[in-house]
Structure formats: C-alpha cells, structure tokens
Image (cartoon, rainbow, N blue to C red):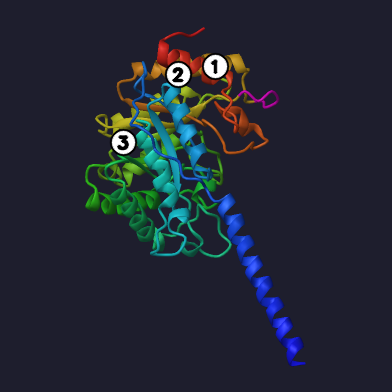
Amino acid sequence: MRFSRRVALVGVLVFVVIFSLLTIAIWWVQRPVQVDLGPQQQVKTLNPKAGVHTRLDNEVEPWKIKRTLEMVREMGAPWIVEYFPWAFSEPVKGRYDWEHADLVINHANRQGLEMIARLGYVPEWARPPGTTSTHLESDQFADFAEYAAAFAERYRDRVHYIIIWNEPNLSLEWGYRPVDPEAYVELLRQTATAIRTVNPDVTILAGALAPTVGDPTGELGMSDLDFLQAMYDAGAAPYFDALAVHSYGLTYPPDDPPDPEVVNFRRVELIRQVMEANGDGDKDIHITEAGWNDHPRWTRAVRPAQRIRYTLRAYEMALDWPWLKSLSFWAFRYPWLERNLRDYYTFVTPDFDPKAIYLDVQDALVSGESD
C-alpha cells in the first residue's frame, strides 16, 4: 500500500511539473513581444490640422500599435485621438495599471504625433450592479477626477490635450439615463480642478458632443446646440480650455450650409456661434470624430469615391477655420473586422492594407496631389 501511494504521489508531482512547464512554454510563445520605439520621427504634412481617431484601446500586440502609428505619420496626419478607458487603467480602486497606456503613448510620441486623450468607461467597482460602462453616479465623480488627474500627471510631458467624457448629450453615453447638462458640468468642474492641480499646462477639452437635433421626448438625447448652451448656463466656461465636437457628414457634401435641423459637417459652425454668443470665442474647437461612411447598403452612406472627395474637401475647409485646431476622422483602423457598417469608416484594414482613401489622403497631405 505504501509503495502504491508513493507511486501515485510521484505521478501527481510529475503531472504538476509537466503541466507547469507547458503553461510557462505557452505563455512564453504567446507573450506580447516588445518592440523598440525606434528613432524620433516627425510628421511631414501640408495640413497641420489633419488627424484621425486611432482606437488602439483594444489592440494588444505592440508591433501592431507601432505600425498603426507609423502609418498615421506616413499618411501625413500630425494629430490623433486615442481612447484610454478608466476601467483598463484602474480595474481595482486605487491600483493603477499603466502598461498599455504607456505603450500607446510612448509609440505615438516617438512617431511625432500630437495626441488628444479621451477618458471614460466606468469600471465595475465605480458603478451600480447591472449598469453599463457609461453610467457614473455623482458620488463617483471624485473617483473619475482622481483617475484623470493621475493620468494627466503621469503623461504631463507627452499628452497635452485631454477630453473629459464622450458625447454626454446622448442617453447611451450617460448610462442610458436622461442626459443632464448640469451633472456633466459638475463632473467637468471636479475633473478639471483635479487635473489642473497636478498639470496646469494641459488643455482640457469639454464635450465631445454628438451631432444631433435631439428627439421630442428627450429619451435618446439632447441637441448638441441646446446641450452646449445648457452647459454655459450651468457655469461650465471656467472649467474647459477648448471644446471637442463630433461632425459627421452623413449623405451631405462637406460644403452644405449649416442648419439647426440638419446633421451635416458644417453643423460645427453653429456650435461656434453658441460659443461666441457666450463670450468664449477665444477658445479653440477640436473635431475629434468626423467622416463619411461608404457601406454599400446603408441609407446614410455615400459611394467610396464620394467619401474620398468629401474627406479631402473637409481637410481643406479646416484650414480656413481659424477657430478649428484639429480635425480627426473616425476611424483609422480596427484590430479586427467589426463585420458591420463601422468597417466602412476605416482608412486601413486590420491587416494594414491601405484603402484607396488612405492613399489619396496621403497624396494630398504629403505631396499636395489629389484627383
């Protein structure tokens, strides 16, 4: 009996050792391979306002992060907008994990890109059970402000622009609750105060307002124009240095005139009027999402050739707006196919094959040539 037990024990130990070695081997093979930052680069461009939204928050392989940012630089876009989810950097209250953020920011900096960092996405510990990642109660505003301040302090020499939240004038971005401009201003106030305490030189962007005329019931959201005015009425002006807005063209050409009842590219001019009416004409606007979609079956899409022409024209128009600091199109690339209409906003495939729009934009931004 003792011999049998010893044999069984030895067998278990051998199994444990072999299993452990296999686990280590698999981890070693699959671990992300670090990629050298390489020499400092500089963006060569004819348009200092041109940018793209890169969406690297779900990209885990360092070489793909580097290649994405290289291709942005090679396209001639000096600006990027990147998303840094709060839940990724602070999965447990008070315990920060900056590994992925470090990777993205260091590579972007080395490629010579100016980054606008978008902060949001509430971790589970900071919201009620059963709520979505955009649900943030006022009791947790201070937690978000603390995270934003930690981010601003860590990257004070590399990130000079920070957006506070995303599309707060839409219900789905406010935790599927009725939108609340006054509450958003309070979030902005607490966050801006915390950031400025540790990094007074950073440019704080409010809004990232969604272009919408709202809906009669208010259940889906509020017009960006009305929401911005409500922000001013609630005393928002001292707490932001510039305004982030989204400016999608849908089926309309970029030159179509602005109309309060229409969502088109020049709707941003109406946003500008609200700012000036409230004495905020000295602040810049950053368009942090924009673009046209060329899905073959979406009723709000355009043809691929139209998308290229409209994009090139929008970049040109940005140069004529002295109050516009940057124009970033959605979205440069996704880590994998979304298999829906979102794929038809991109400039580059997941495998880094440049689409026609990438090549034409590159010609226009780098060499000044366009069809």
Q: What residue is disc 3 on?
A: 242
Disc 3 marks a residue whose amino acid type is: Ala
Q: Name which residue lies at 58% across and 22% down.
A: 355
Q: What residue is disc 1 on?
A: 308
Q: Is residue 3 above or below residue 280?
A: below
Q: Name which residue lies at 36% across and 56% down.
A: 147
Number of residues whose C-alpha sits closer than 10 Å to that of mark 3, classed few (under 14), some (14–19) or many (20 or more): many
Q: Secondary structure at mark 3?
A: strand
- Specify the farthest residue to the bottom: 1
In terms of sequence position, does the residue under pointer 1 or pointer 2 come before the other? 1
Q: Where's residue 276, x and y in %? A: 29, 29
Q: What residue is disc 2 on?
A: 314
Residue 236 occupies quadrant: top left
In terms of sequence position, does the residue under pointer 3 or pointer 1 come before the other? 3
**What is the span of residues highlighted in magenta in the rendered image?**
294-299
Q: Estimate the spatial distance between the alpha carbons at disc 3 and disc 1, rounded to whole Å.
A: 29 Å
Q: Name which residue lies at 40% across and 63% down.
A: 95
The reply to whether residue 114 is visible in this rendering is no
